[in-house]
Image (cartoon, helix red, strand yellow):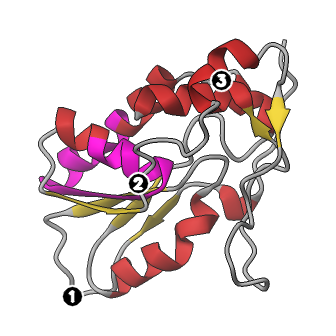
Amino acid sequence: MPRPVAVAPEDLPLRLMPAAPARRDHCVVLLHGFTSTPASVRAWAEGLAAGGSPVSVPLLPGHGTRWEDLAATGADEIRAAVRAVVDLELARHGRVVMAGISMGGALALDAAAHRPVAGVLVVNPALRFASPLAPFAPLLAPFVPTVAPIADDIADPTARERAYPRTPVAGVAAVGHIQ
């Protein structure tokens, strides 16, 4: 039985509503990247809300706890969670705009292919891996469970990204199935 793991408050899902008066006939569903959390896109979400859009930022399955949880999470589970959020926001608002960064961008495009969204905005969508070893992740995962983290890979040395201290190779395989 897996041990329970608490999610840090800053990593919890976000739901931001703009100050009145604001249009509420749409919602932006904003998706974080691989091994990250809603905290990584909080400033983006706040900017969208300040501009008048309700924003929903889910914590994707396998994220925000420990890398072992992500290693045990498949692409179908992540996709299903995103589609459930989209369905919920469509019921609440009538229109949804998808947005995401990296893996979240790939998931936003995937959701747009399967749900009637009004638009899509992606930043650096993870459409393919640069590493020639990535396609072998499913075979490597039992022997190499983790690799170096992908967090804090921003050129600005003062920028800090909340993410796992290791990257689970099984998680890389799951992202490969989303691409």
Secondary structure at numbered mark 3: helix
Q: Quadrant of residue 52?
A: bottom left
Q: Nearer the viewer, mark 3 or mark 1?
A: 3
Which range of residues does the magenta coloring cover? 83-109
**Label 3 packing within 10 angstroms: few (<14), some (14-19), many (20+):** some
**Amino acid on which the number 3 mark rests in the picture:** Ala
Q: Main secondary structure of the magenta part?
A: helix
Residues at marks 3 and 2 touching, judged by CB atoms closer than 8 Å: no
Amino acid type, callout 1: Pro
Q: Tell me which amino acid carries mark 2.
A: Pro
Provide residue 139's location: percent of width, then percent of height: 68, 12
Q: Which residue is mark 1?
A: 21
- Residue at x 59%, y 25% (from the top left corner): 173
Q: Which mark is residue 137?
A: 3
- Mark 3 to mark 1: distance in Å? 49 Å
Q: Which mark is residue 131?
A: none
